[in-house]
Amino acid sequence: MVTVWCSLEQMGSRIPYLRDPDFSQPLLEIDAGAWEHMCQRLAFLYGRETAEAWMPELERILKVHHAHKPPQLIDEEQGLDPAERFSERDLVLITYADAVRSREATGIETLHRFVETYYDSVNTIHMLPFFPYSSDRGFAVVDLKSVDPRVGSWEMVRELALDYDLMFDAVFNHVSSRSEMFRGFLRGDAQYRDFFIAYDSPDELTADQRSKIFRPRTSDILTRYETIDGPKYVWTTFSPDQIDFNFRNPRVLLAVLEALLFYVRRGADIIRLDAVTYLWSEPGTESIHLPQTHEIIKLLRDVLDTVAPGVALVTETNVPHRQNISYFGNGSDEAHMVYNFALPPLVLHTFYSEDTTAISEWAAGLELPSDRTHLFNILDTHDGVGVQGVRGILTREQIDALVERAAEHGAYVSYKSTGAGEEPYEINTTWWSAINRDGSDEPIALQVKRFVASRSIALVLKGIPGAYTHGIVALPNDHALVEQTGLKRDVNRGVIDTEIFREHLRRPGSKRSLLRLEQRELTHVRTHDRAFHPRGVQRVLMPSTSVFALLRSSPEGDRHVLTLTNVTAAIVHLAIPLADIGLADTTWYELLRGEHLTCAVGRLTCDMGPYDVLWLTPTRERLEDRRSGR
């Protein structure tokens, strides 16, 4: 089941797709312009003759999808406002389906109850791959269209979709070696013969070609498999168990399109394109960011715009910032949203150095191609903290210092291959341990303040905030799990026990209870103030290198929130000229504590304690909100 997206104001009832297509209703008629647009995409990839030969099959796929729509859903889609696809109310929880364990069960139902009970500001859940898999914690998918029975069923996904928008992972770069597709390849099945990139000899991929390939791993790019036709050496970007698809074969692309629309019908409001930068491989190049990869993403966007206009695409490309935002295309033809991979290492650098210069200068220069494109502001993910996003923003020395400091906090470091050897690719850690040193004897209240201050930056920065489960519950590094599995990333992938979680919440002054008090107010204000709308305006102020200062304004310009975050353990005295803020108001209201500040001599002055977070709005606007009932 899926519901067409609309804002809370637009939302009437959630309208599910039909379980079976209804061919008695009018079939989809594809506009001639849209048909030609998609044909040109295929022609770019395969040539015009091949494109025209495959367009009827693409049309069939789209018509079948459309036939699953009840008339009410078709009517609802007509009234969608693309400008309100995302709003200030959006807060995404990133989680494994089995991240939470109760006495009764582990899986989608337990996760559902956990989020309902403890995180009422969340409106979107991104379940990391919940399909049957053979390795890489879900990212070696055995069956793209099944739910792993260990975590639940499609019926449980349907129930979750009644209460939350859902983000699905589209793992289209590769598939498990145990998948039926790859097994068919090994058997010589004609339909799967060219589904994968295979060589008769490893020497067919020369040493020069290998040296140019950009990879997030250090293992061999080719893996030997025995087939009915003898040994074959297949392209495996991530691991020997994850076999890259061969998108030079149009059948592969159309199979991916079918899976994409299957996810839409099953409940996906947002589709996350995992590791999509590696989609098209080309010997002799780095095999990332290739024009063919961008063209495929644009075709996926065309398909969604045609038959599922309420569904958004988000690209996951852990690369330097400038390359990352290239996946927005021209602002209307590629991704709706991209992961903001520069943000996590920038925030860590800011808190380690107690200096906001780098993050303030970066944020001040942020430019997006349109107001319909958005950054997905995350601090941590299931992999930890990538460092590729800040290459070109931080110096080599700053990155090295960042990695070294995180390691001192108990983190592991994973490396990637380069032509010159290896370099740090990601820091494997939980966010709590990255911010607060493992085994620290600091007062817990101070550690909580530092942690909450760091996480507040992802909430105030323009874009859509997302939070990984282990981050928001502040789990420390799980070194025991790493010792058990031998996988560095598992340091941030332990199971959350709901009984222990609940017990800790009951203890006044405990880390868990302090966090709940601090975080709940932040997320409540963030998701109820239109100044944080992703189409609004943000302006960076630099009143002190100790404070990250951001002025957020609503799209209509009638709501303003000045956010101030002290990134140091010291008391900071601020005196910000009202002229710098651009507002003449002399009285301000602090939204998190309910306090009033009065300006003197044209300056907004305040003392910020260690790791204080202040969100200030003009008292005049606060009173207008109360009068209007907002």
Image (spheres, rainbow, N blue to C red):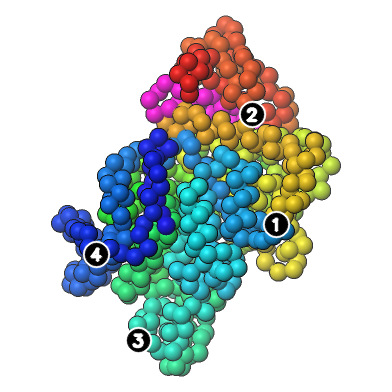
Q: Position of residue 397 (x, y in %)?
A: 62, 48
What residue does disc 3 label? 190
Residue behind mark 1: 102
Mark 4 highlights which residue? 23
Local crowd at mark 3 within 10 Å, few (<14), some, or many (≥20)? Answer: few
- Label whose residue precedes the other's in the sequence (4 or 1): 4
From this view, report whether residue 212 is shown above or below residue 389: below
> Is 557 one of the magenta-colored residues?
yes
How far is mark 4 from mark 1, CA to CA? Answer: 44 Å
- The mark nearer the N terminus, 3 or 1, is 1
Q: Earlier in the sequence, mark 1 or mark 2?
A: 1
Q: Residue at x 35, y 86 (%)?
A: 190
How packed mark 2 is, by other alpha carbons closer than 10 Å (few <14, some 14-19, many 20 or more), is many
Task: Give the residue drawn at x 78%, y 46%.
Answer: 503
Three-letter code for the amino acid on which mark 3 is drawn: Ala
Residue 380 visible to an observer of this rendering: no
Give the spatial CA distance, label 3 vs label 1: 46 Å
Is label 4 in contact with label 2 (beta carbons under 8 Å)? no
Residue 193, image x, y percentages: 37, 84
Cα separation between marks 3 and 2? 61 Å
Q: Which residues are magenta?
A: 544-568
- Residue 492 vs 486, above or below: the answer is above
- In the picture, the disc for residue 613 is 2
Check disc 2 and give the amino acid type.
Val
142 is within the stretch colored magenta: no
Give the secondary structure at mark 2. Answer: strand
Give the CA separation, mark 3 to mark 4: 31 Å
Q: Nearer the viewer, mark 4 or mark 2?
A: 4
Position in image of residue 79 (x %, y %): 29, 41
Question: Disc 1 versus disc 2: distance between alpha carbons?
Answer: 34 Å
Residue farthest toward the top in the current orientation of the protein: 601
Image-quadrant location for residue 346: top right
